[in-house]
Amino acid sequence: MASASYHISNLLEKMTSSDKDFRFMATNDLMSELQKDSIKLDDDSERKVVKMILKLLEDKNGEVQNLAVKCLGPLVSKVKEYQVETIVDTLCTNMLADKEQLRDISSIGLKTVIGELPPASSGSALAASVCKKITGRLTSAIAKQEDVSVQLEALDIMADMLCRQGGLLVNFHPSILSCLLPQLTSPRLAVRKRTIIALGHLVMSCGNLVFVDLIEHLLSELSRNDSMSTTRTYIQCIAAISRQAGHRIGEMLKYFIYKMALDNECFLEPGVLLVLSTALCFSTVCQSSINHIPTYSYWLVPLIINGSDDEYSDDDDMSWKVRRAAAKCLDAVVSTRHEMLPEFYRTVSPALIARFKEREENVKADVFHAYLSLLKQTRPAQSWLCDPDAMEQGETPLTMLQNQVPMIVKALHKQMKEKSVKTRQCCFNMLTELVNVLPGALTLHIPVLVPGIIFSLNDKSSSSNLKIDALSCLYVVLCNHQPQVFHPHVQALVPPVVACVGDPFYKITSEALLVSQQLVKVIRPLDQPERDTFDASPYITDLFTCTIKRLKAADIDQEVKERAISCMGQIICNLGDSLGDDLPGTLHIFLERLKNEITRLTTVKALTLIAGSTLKIDLRPILDEAVPILASFLRKNQRALKLSTLAALDILVKNYSDSVTPAMIDAVLAELPPLISESDMHVSQMVISFLTTLARVHPLSLAKIGGSSILSELISLVRSPLLQGGALSAMLEFFQALVGTGTSSLGYMDLLRMLTGPVYAQSAALTHKQSYYSIAKCVAALTRACPDEGPAVVGQFIQDVKNSRSTDSIRLLALLSLGEVGHHVDLSGQPELKTVILDAFSSSSEEVKSAASYALGSIAVGNLPEYLPFVLGEISGQPKRQYLLLHSLKEIISSASVTGLKPYVEGVWTLLLKHCECAEEGTRNVVAECLGKLTLIDPETLLPRLKGYLLSGSSYARSSVVTAVKFTISDHPQTIDPLLKNCIGDFLKTLEDPDLNVRRVALVTFNSAAHNKPSLIRDLLDTVLPHLYNETKVRKELIREVEMGPFKHTVDDGLDIRKAAFECMYTLLDSCLDRLDIFEFLNHVEDGLKDHYDIKMLTFLMLARLSTLCPSAVLQRLDRLVEPLRATCTTKVKANSVKQEFEKQDELKRSAMRAVVALLTIPEAEKSPLMSEFQSQISSNPELAAIFESIQRDSSSANMESMDTS
């Protein structure tokens, strides 16, 4: 330290030299020293250095002055706070000096100091004190009118400080505002401009009162309208505020527009329109303004048409600015008002289409962009929106767009041959988006559009980007239309596409190969052989030659390599029978690519395509080498490669069984055991499917699996609780195929023993109930495949259930197996069966009773005439067993065929209605499910009956009926849907029912409809939502106190219905977002953030979802949302609370923090003062900071995983 002080003393001495070079070098060396992290100055050295640097700022030599300013940056972070204040005081004084050079250098110095201060979010005391000191001096300098150059510098520094440290100056914001506002009327435009910039930065951090004062001042000055010059200034100021804090200006927007509308000349100012577009882009206009949006459209549409081509003159300079601003404004309106799409298609769309012929290129680009925004808003977010069964009535945006396609094409096709590259690119982008929104829309217009695409592909003056856009557009059009549409144009399309494949620029080549691949499907569509009348032979050579050239090249881009492989795969798949002697050589190139780590995955997919071709391509030249290579891929640590390889092997074994040798199969089988695991069910399912194919086409090859670990791994997988769905179905098929091979030691009884052994051994009882169901299904699959063995095994299972020494596990498996077998095989020949199952209803084990109930229902499906009357009789005669017998009936109704059940519908319906008023909720729920599923059998008759019971005086009956409706709704089209759509409103009227439970089940039914078939309820939302929102409120009359010994416990009877209401709200975000008033929705989300634990968890999820779906609306409410989140994160559990309370609070904190992380992904969220303050609080609290960082890591890794398209 002593040596450092000595060195600096020497430098300071040299700085006093009369030689400017000495001073320059000494200052330069000092800067180098100050930039070192290790340097530490004592108080005396600090004082001397600061004094010298400030002195050098007044040096006669400009270079020394510049270096001295640069020293201020590192110096600020090295000296104590009072020294920094000295620096700032001196700089502020010098900034007001008479010498212009000193003023300039001091201004630069102040900016340097401000730039080096820690950010406002760090909560630095130094930054706060420095900024407060500067602020007072700056405001007086700005107010001092004499010297404009001082004003300009002061405004510049003020803007810089507000931008960087605005949050620290909250107490000074009113005085800053009162100092800035008068400058808006300054005679100097430069002063006005810098004032506007400073005000823009001020609104990022100021409080609501200051913001309102500013806006009110601007609006009152606008209404005075003293001169066009000042009016323009105020308009520009509002535009700056919109850019910096658009989410805050939404509520004021209507006043601004009305004031402008009063003055037509003023409204035609491009600045006004740009303010409107900026405000709309950066904010979602509040509810009170939504009603005025159509008015904006009606004002804007005439403006965009303003100025026809016939009236062109150089004096017409202003009209294009107005049209351009109007186009931007419409773009913003369209992008933010999704619910107004029908209105836009009636008014905005025709006006935009009419301006595609705009003469000004920049205006034309904005018009195209506005129409693109309209198309993007029209693209269905969910598949059900474009589902023909979605039952949308009237003119939808999609049908209106369909009707306007001829107008769009007529306007575009002339533009596609324009000289302007930008215009043509816009045309291609437009067509691409149009076809994505409406597949097949251009079917009748292809002859008009193809010449325009070819024009850009052949045009030598075309840029690379234009060709890429043209090819990309052609690819999308080819993919989304029937092949026959293009057959008349193939002759014209193939040459330019082939030429693009040979282009030296790799991106054009890559895109052209993609188009070539699609062209191959067009000229010979294998999926439509009956309509394949087109002669492809003239084009095969060209397509093959250009692709093989790229396939052989080793020194090309990775993307081109992969697309060349895919394209050649498609050529061989669709045209392989026409390649002749070229085929074996091409296949050997594939073999080489298979050995390359970079291209192997794409090659495997291409080989799968070729192997599955209906042309039966001869793959024998490469099979001997390819299969062992594919087998080796199964041990690679690349999941996508494993899945693709298993699919390839499956299709090869299926279609080339004669050429696949036992040695090849053994090589594959050796790699399979590690892949059969519950840790990756998809890979396991693919392995099982492959083994099933092997059992069918190569039965002898499975003789060895009995002794290998493959079978033991499969048996272990059967016992896994995760085995269900597609993997379980594949397993059942495999066992049926395996037992059908007749392999010794793998016969019916051998496999049965392997499956049921652990249960009968008793020593190793299975831990999960699902395992018993899986084993039972496998047993039933084997029994169906070997019907001769069935009776003996069924008899044994019956004895196992009867045997008093059998464990519950054995009884459970036996009953489930009887049920699964009886589902497919008639077991009425077993005289003891009914008695044995009914006796099992009396078991002490709940699981055995449940299995007996399931077994009885499942067996009844195998012979309805025998068993259904028996079950109905037992329900009537055995009230104690009613619940279990109703479950059996539910199984019958769910699984039996419609034709088999129809004769019994009336009897079952009558019986169920007797029990729908049962006081036991569990019984009512089963009855309701049976009623719902029974209604699906004869909806015309039974749905009106259900509706009639809504008038029942019993609340139990009403709740059963409404719950029954829930079971008539599924996510696939059904015959009941049109009938249900007409009357679901009547069922949802029970949301007004006086009984709390009826309202709750009505919400559950509504949630099911919104999730599975939103089209049923979309048109009812206006009437349903007020009742839904009403149920989100906490009702004090439903909260009661219960005494539990010495303690009092609060019980909220309204909690379940509130949870149901919030669950409905969450579902509506996914299915009916465009029908929601998002601000009203957010009001109730805010209430939920302060509610019970379960509801808080739901609303945190909703907040995260809303941050993605409606970021601008959330941004407007951010300050109101942050406070409850902060309260949750900072709540502390009492020290004497139970462990569960601590766990619940931790989970709440994590969920709240996930919502915070989601909110911070919204652009400009960090500009909110409350959010910035909360962030500082999180970073200063180690516990919250750790949670925050861990969630950020999780979300970033999840994003990375979602980007991995493989």
Image (spheres, rainbow, N blue to C red):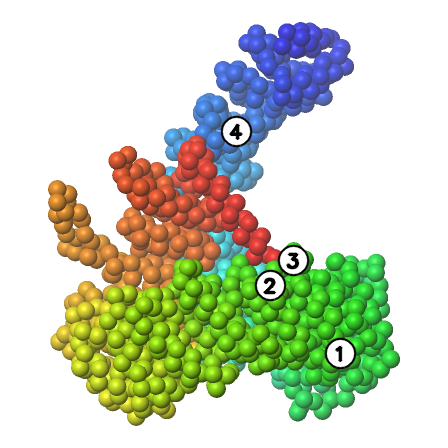
Mark seen at residue 118: 4
Q: Within 10 Å of the Cα at label 2, are there few (<14), some (14-19), or many (20+) other Cα atoms?
A: some
Residue at image coords 25%, 61%: 1057
Q: Is residue 225 above or below residue 178?
A: below
Q: Is residue 4 above or below residue 846?
A: above
Report the quarter where the C terminus lies.
bottom right
Q: Which residue is mark 2?
A: 709
Q: Give the Cα distance between marks 1 and 2.
A: 26 Å
Q: Quadrant of residue 519?
A: bottom right
Q: Which residue is mark 1?
A: 659
Q: Looking at the picture, how far across and down is residue 903, in whole percent?
A: 30, 93
Q: Looking at the picture, how far across and down is residue 96, in whole percent?
A: 54, 21
Closer to the N terminus: mark 2 or mark 3?
3
Residue at image coords 27%, 50%: 1092
Q: Label 1 amino acid?
A: Ser
Q: Label 2 amino acid?
A: Ser
Q: Give the Cα distance between marks 1 and 4.
A: 73 Å
Closer to the N terminus: mark 2 or mark 4?
4
Q: Give the Cα distance between marks 2 and 3.
A: 23 Å
Q: Give the Cα distance between marks 1 and 3.
A: 28 Å
Q: Nearer the viewer, residue 1107 or 1009?
A: 1009
Q: Nearer the viewer, residue 774 or 291?
A: 774
Q: Looking at the picture, how far across and down is residue 614, in whole percent?
A: 70, 83
Q: Which residue is mark 3?
A: 638
Closer to the N terminus: mark 1 or mark 3?
3
Is residue 200 something one can see in this rendering?
Answer: no
